[in-house]
Amino acid sequence: MIICQLADSITSFLQSPLDSITNAFNFFTLQQFALKQFTNDQLARSVEAGNPRMAPEQTSKVVETAVENSRNVGTASYLRNPNITEEEKKVIQQILTTGSATSSGVTISHSPKTIEREKNKTGGWSYVINNGSPMLYVTLFRIAKAMGESFVVTCGYRSPEANAQIRNAAKKSLHMRGQALDVGMGSLTTSQKARFIDLASSEGLGGIQYYPSDNFTHIDVGAVRTWVNDAGVRQGGVAIPSEIMDALRRHERGTPAASISSSQLTTSNAQ
Ligand SMILES: [Zn+2]
């Protein structure tokens, strides 16, 4: 009985993706179910090839619904600036369909490992946007734009199975809810990494931690916290530079030393 109902809704979804979607949060689950349980050559082959799950023009409604819903996601005093610009909508729409987006001279993309997880349906970015918090990507894009730096996401959504395989991963990781991103710090200087943390803090993100051994920063929409005490100053045997420790302490106190000013946002949006 339940299977029949699902089959009906999946059939109507395949025929008319957007009409059948009244709630973006059901979409990914439904699609995953379709991919796992039903043979639809076109869709399955397309996703296996790493192609968009939906045509870009079909995603705008999903993105808008997801953005709207994400305002209630998480426990942090999240979303200092909840007004999503058209540019930002396009950015998450592009990430949803291809996993990367370039705008205002900066690029948000994903590491090969994350792309692999997306293809194997054990993680990736689409879940973060459909079921988690697309605002994480908007926030990351705002930070990237303010710093004039591109970023590579090394982990978005992580399935419970994938999470279990990672040594030292939190058992209740917000990655499993699509509410966290790990962002590679690339060739940023120590000062720039500290600034990244200050900007993430000032934008209202909750969990922030820099991992020196792998050179990435975890950001999430949970409660305000760092893992300085848990991970220790020497996480992975590598010391966290004091400048970055200071930024993490400022985050704990709610006193970030830098912010993306509204004037800066307005100016860059006009470009
Ligand atoms: Zn993380």
Image: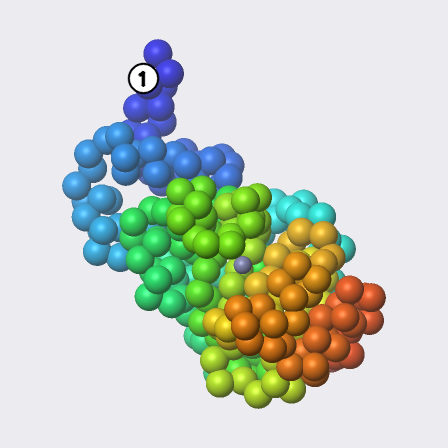
Q: Residue furthest front?
A: 237
User: Relative to 9, is 78 on the left or the right?
Assistant: right
Query: Which residue is painted at 19% across and 34% down in the image?
Result: 39
User: Relative to 95, is 261 on the left or the right?
Assistant: right
Residue 226, compared with residue 171, is above or below; it is below
Nearer to the camera, 11 or 101 = 101
Residue named by callout 1: 4
Ligand 1's quadrant is: bottom right
User: Relative to 213, is 7 on the left or the right?
Assistant: left
Q: Quadrant of residue 205?
A: bottom right
- Amino acid, disc 1: Cys
- What percent of the width, then of the height, locates residue 83? 67, 61
Residue 6, compared with residue 160, is above or below; it is above
Nearer to the camera, 231 or 188 = 231
> Which image quadrant: the N terminus?
top left
Residue 31, compared with residue 57, is above or below; it is above
